[in-house]
Amino acid sequence: MPTISQNALIDKITRVLRADARVEAAGLSGSLGRCEGDEFSDVDVLVLVADLNSTARPQRSALQELEPTGGVRC
């Protein structure tokens, strides 16, 4: 089960991805996606876009706004 800090990060990521029309689908993966995570788990997100070559740079700059909160670290 995600911690408060992990949930806050997931919420931020969700807002950024929902605002980007190029994103076709996204989902939580890794241990948190399997409901096996703990307070030390990182937040793994799988994102599906139509054409990675045309979207990689703009999406990267949008995601730079996201900073881990609380105990979630890269």
Image (cartoon, rainbow, N blue to C red):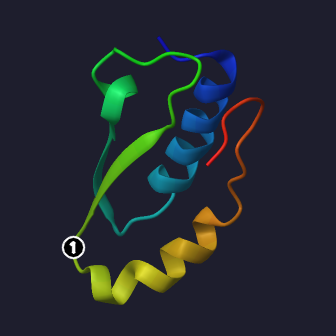
Q: Quadrant of residue 9?
A: top right
| Residues packed near mark 1 inside 10 Å, few (<14), some (14 to 19) or many (20 plus) | few
- Residue 55 image offset from top left, x and y in percent: 39, 81
Tell whether 43 sits left or right of 35.
right
Q: Is residue 51 left or right of residue 28?
A: left
Extreme residue toward the bottom, this view: 54
- Residue 45 spot, x, y in % from top left: 39, 46
Residue nearest the observer in this picture, 14 or 60: 60
Residue 35 position, x and y percent, is 33, 15
- As drawn, which residue projects farthest toward the top? 1
Residue drawn at 35 percent across, 15 percent down: 36
Tell me what residue is drawn at x 66 percent, y 30 percent.
Answer: 8
- Residue designated by label 1: 50
Q: Relative to 36, does residue 19 appear above or below in the rendering?
A: below
Residue 73, located in which quarter of the rendered image?
top right
Taking depth in this image into account, of 32 and 59 the one nearest to the observer is 32
The residue positioned 49% from the left and 38% from the top of the image is 43
Q: Is residue 27 left or right of residue 60?
A: left
Residue furthest toward the left?
Answer: 50
Tell me which corner region of the image, top left, top right, bottom left or bottom right, holds residue 31: top left
Q: What is the secondary structure assignment of the residue under circle 1?
A: loop
- Tell me the amino acid under the disc marked 1: Ala
Give the residue drawn at x 61%, y 16%: 3
